[in-house]
Amino acid sequence: MKKTLILGASTNSARYSYLVANKLVRKGYPIVNVGRKVGEVAGVEIESTDRIHNDIDTITLYVGPKNQPVYYDYILQTKPNRVIFNPGTENEELKAKLEAAGIEAVEACTLVMLNTNQY
């Protein structure tokens, strides 16, 4: 199963990152939650960017473009196979950096992908 890092994880049940974390876990995908606040989502603690994971298939973004630059190095060092830009997170600068590093950049909605078995 594709291990997924949720960047912008939130304990707020109204947030899409929260819904996606729970959906991924229900479907059997292992997840890593990364966010600014302490807590847990779908039974998995929210981490900071201090730890680089080397076994991530997908990073799904829930951080707006203005707040993404501080995460560029973290994302690139993680070396995922793909990064999903969820609606509102699209960023041409980051997309270019990912593509230059051989990382697939996908503009899509992770929740829709999961609901339609396209994940």
Image (cartoon, rainbow, N blue to C red):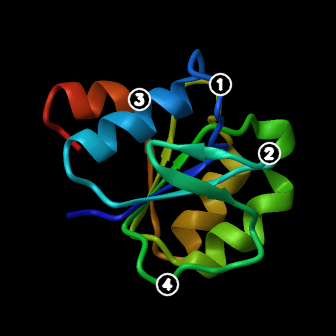
Q: Residue at x 77, y 38 (%)?
A: 65
Seen from the viewer's position, the closer of residues 94 and 46 is: 46
Identify the residue under disc 1. 12
Q: Is residue 108 left or right of residue 66?
A: left
Identify the residue under disc 3. 109
Tell me which label, 4 or 1, sits earlier in the chain. Answer: 1
Amino acid under label 3?
Cys
Q: Quadrant of the N terminus?
A: bottom left
Identify the residue under disc 4. 54
Tell me which label, 3 or 2, sits earlier in the chain. Answer: 2
- Where 23 sits versus 15, above or below? below
Amino acid under label 1?
Asn
Regarding mark 1 in the picture, which secondary structure is present there?
Answer: loop
* Contact? badges 3 and 4 (CB < 8 Å): no
- Where 106 sits versus 110, above or below? below
Residue 37 bears which disc, if any?
Answer: 2
Mark 1 is surrounded, within 10 Å at the Cα level, by few (under 14), some (14 to 19) or many (20 or more) other residues, namely: few
Q: Nearer the viewer, mark 4 or mark 2?
A: 2
